[in-house]
Amino acid sequence: MERPVPAGLREEERVLVSEQSWRPCPKARRRLRGCLEWVKRQLFRVGEDWYFLFILGVLMATISFMMDLLVSRLYKAHRWLYQEVGDILVLKYLSWTMYPTALAAFSTGFSQSITPYSGGSGIPELKTILTGVVLEDYLAIQNFGAKVVGLTCTLACGSTVFLGKVGPFVHLSAMAAVYLGKMRTSVTREYENKFKQNEMLVAAQAVGVATVFGAPISGVLFSIEVMSSHFAVRDYWRGFFAATCGAFMFRLLAVFNSEQGKAGWAGCAPPPSPLPPPGGETIAAVFKSDLKIDFPFDLLETFFFVILGAVCGLVGCAYLCCQRWLLAAVKENRLTAKLLATDKPVYTVLVVLLLASVTFPPGLGQLMASRLTMKEYLTSLFDNRTWGALLPNASSVADPPGVDPRGLWQEWCHPSATIFGTLAFFLLMKFWMLILATTLPLPAGYFMPIFIYGAVIGRLLGETVALLFPRGLRSEGDLRPVIPGGYALAGAAAFSGSVTHTISTALLVCEITGHLGHVLPVILAVLVANAIAQKHQPSFYDGTIIVKKLPYLPPIRSRHMASYQVVVEEVMERRVVALAKGGGFEEVLVALDASADAEYPVVESAGSPTLVGTVSRAQLVTFLQSHEHPQAPPGEKLAVTGTLGDNCAIEPIMLQLSPWTSLHQAHHLFELLKLQRIFVTRFGELVGAVSRVEVRGGDEEGDKEG
């Protein structure tokens, strides 16, 4: 029976009351609601962060694993199609080129049709967001779906396009963290807090790396080095907890999938992967190596690891310079700029078709081991054996990839070239191919390609050292041959570290391979490479920020004493629109017309420029709407009168700079406090203002002087 609606209510209220009146069992519903509230209080007694960080890690690990599984199936379909067309060269070429071209075109078209912010890795934009700049569109939930689908198609292109997923997964984790943060506010019935959102974003960075490599420790450290100029130690446990949950879930799913694969292969041909050790599957390294642990390297080899670090640093500088130049040239060229503005899929088709044609196996691809996948590249390069010593016993025709992981090295063999020739040709061709692939407007990561490229540099140097010293660097004593796989580890860490300006790549190679024997020479090579790259070039992500002209403060690279002598007075903006505390309608109107600032400084009076606080633009607009205009007709005048100081809430100044403050100090304050603008005072009087634009310009001048 419907309850009567009280009289005297508005129509909207009557509708709400009538909707509430027919719900059955009000007592049972109240008891159930009370039970749920009690359960929530008990669960959140230890803090709600633990639950949401756990959900974030498990969610991203599941997405990462399912994406890898789907990409593997798509790549196997491409390999099957290439083998089934027979020996007809035209059909083999079409099957090799059209498959990745169609996938890349779909990735670009689908992601760009949903949101134009899904292209690239997303790390430059996320770095900008973490400095306090608002870029809401990059963390929108619709961007999540577009990036997942687009990234899956990009990865399915395989080594033809040669792109990874580390950067996009960091971006995906950030979007998931923002969405989970909104869910948390609805569950806990709290207001959305920007500081809380920033804490979740910090944890999401580590989850993105950890769920790609299954490496929680290096995932946290790498995300801190790449994303943060200043890091709050209170967020340390959040990153480690979420990254550990994600990495553990990612490896656990791999174990479950391997057990199902063993059951599925029962009664059939043996599986393509090597059999697990007795006792079943367990959690192991992603790229498990068989490098020798008893004597991994000779002490004299340290000299060659230093040379390897220097080579990686120099090549990294060349790569960063050329990549930044090409990225800007593509935007400035009339044809490519038009394609990227109106027909992004067409540009993607042209670039991917070129890359696929170069990697065609019967053509130049046979000199670059183009039939290998990204994971097979690393598995072969981290091989414990010396390829130069295996060549006399190698067969003239290599087996298809995937049959025997220990035979993957044969993909680098060619009758008309040596191992050194194929490795050097790979480095030469992939240098410009990697740079060209970074201009594609599709969701893609760029860390894994440079990681593999560095492994090839290290493998080439290691094979060279093994050729020069076949019995090792010591002629007397036991035979201790050189292990080129150790040089591949150091090269991968050194080159990727030099390009991204990170040191944690040394730990990353140890975590993903489960090998710690070469940790000291690897760190040495990474330090040497970083010393060279950081001196001469901005990092890969900072360079992209510069080209895209994002409102981000790049770090001051110069450490010359002249750069420390630059003070705020030399770069500050002197013409600042200020309002007097006793100003009226006309003064406020002139100030709003003269500047579009979000807040305005308020001084004591026109004759006394002592800074007393700031007032927001929104309050000034409200002030104009509620006050009378001096020239308005008498019938239109408002009754409210008064001055700015009487009717507006003036916020006190919490931070101000002196004209003699060092530019380095101002730069650190902007980074640490995520500021957008600071006023400059001399003995309390307003003399100027410094924003991110002036600090960035001053940094560039300081770098030139240094």
Image: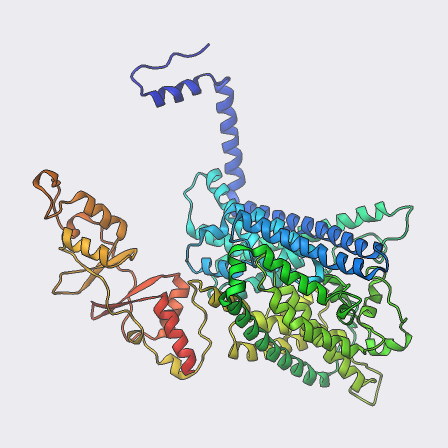
Give the colouring mode of the picture: rainbow
**Lateral position of residue 207 relative to residue 188, left or right:** right
Quarter placement of the C terminus: bottom left
Horizontal side, residue 282 vs residue 222: left or right: right
Residues 609 and 425: in front is: 425
In this rendering, the answer to whether 280 lies above or below 131 is above
Q: Where in the figure is residue 335, as x and y percent of width and height?
A: 53, 64
Q: Residue furthest top?
A: 1
- Vertical placement of residue 147 versus 18, above or below: below
Q: Position of residue 132 (x, y in %)?
A: 41, 58
Q: Note whether residue 587 is visible.
A: yes
Residue 340 at x, y percent in the picture: 53, 59
* Residue extending farthest bottom: 476
Q: Residue at x 17, y 65 (%)?
A: 609
Q: Is residue 642 left or right of residue 44?
A: left
Q: Which one is nearer the viewer's eye here, 432 or 518? A: 432
Q: Residue at x 89, y 53 (%)?
A: 270
Q: Residue 11, position in %: x, y?
A: 34, 20
Residue 380: image quadrant is bottom right
Q: Is residue 679 above or below residue 276?
A: below
